[in-house]
Amino acid sequence: MKNFISRHPLFFSVLIILAYDFGMQGLKAMVQPALSLHGAPLATSVIVQGVFSVLIIGLIAGLRWWRDAGFMGRVTGRALVAYSPWIVLPLLMIVDSEPSSAGPLVVLGFAVMMFMVGFAEEALLRGVVLRALLPSGVMRAAILSSLIFGIAHLTNIFQGRDSTSTIVQAVYATFIGIGFAGPRLYSGTIWPAIVLHGMIDFADAASRGFTPANETKPTTPGQMLTVIVITGLYALYGFWLVRKHRRRQSRSAGETF
């Protein structure tokens, strides 16, 4: 498989993300009818996300990319500083949360699911896909992996989500992808990205009152603009760190000769 990835990195990256998205939708459709208990959609999502998290672990293990994907990198002080601006986003989302009558088991279920989503998406996008695209250049890899990440969110339309909100989600997901790619490359570790991604998704669920995304009111134009501006700033921060990482690589290469 490594030979195929080295020859067709972009094709592999698109293929693996499509397999992830449509595979999850297909598995949800199969699992959902088997769950007759109250709150089946959440239970289904937890089960499906758990299955795909295991599959992604198997993919990374098969490729032997634990180090290349950032899982072996130490969480140093520099890494924490590089990721630190991201802690602001989930805090802002929590402040804007809607009142919720969800019980503790529902909240726990969302917490487990969202942190599995954080693991799966970061391991796949900022781990496997970013690594597959790196031979084409650091900046190109960061941009392409983020674009794939954003475009993949358009499949949410097929799950009943409002089309305008989904397009906005695809845009800010792209910005978030670039924003995470920067500290991921600069620090060499993916672990803070996984934790922060999970926190952001959990805060997003909390802001909806722990209700499914397709059951919430459409996002207002003002909210859309605010989200795009904030995540756009994170994208600029990610670009800056990618450039710093690239300059550091160039200096290291120059010192070798």
Image (cartoon, rainbow, N blue to C red):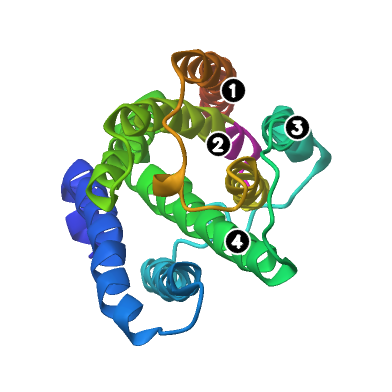
Which mark is first along the chain, 2 or 1?
2
Is the Cβ of the residue at disc 1 closer than 8 Å to that at disc 4? Answer: no
Q: Position of residue 68 (x, y in %)?
A: 49, 53
Q: Amino acid at mark 1?
A: Leu
Tally of numbered tags: 4
Which mark is first along the chain, 4 or 1?
4
* Pointer 1 residue: 241
Q: Position of residue 22 (x, y in %)?
A: 23, 59
For label 2, the crowd category at 10 Å Cα-Cα, with few meaning under 14, some 14 to 19 and many 20 or more, is many
Residue 180 vertical placement versus 230 (above, below) = below
For label 1, the crowd category at 10 Å Cα-Cα, with few meaning under 14, some 14 to 19 and many 20 or more, is many
Which mark is first along the chain, 1 or 3?
3
* Pointer 4 residue: 110
Alpha carbon distance from label 3 to label 1:
28 Å
Left or right of 65? Residue 230 is right
Is the Cβ of the residue at disc 1 closer than 8 Å to that at disc 2? Answer: yes
* Pointer 2 residue: 185
Badge 2 element: helix
Q: Nearer the viewer, residue 170 or 163?
A: 163
Alpha carbon distance from label 1 to label 4:
32 Å
Q: Position of residue 47 (x, y in %)?
A: 46, 76
- Which span is picked out in magenta? 183-189
Badge 1 element: helix
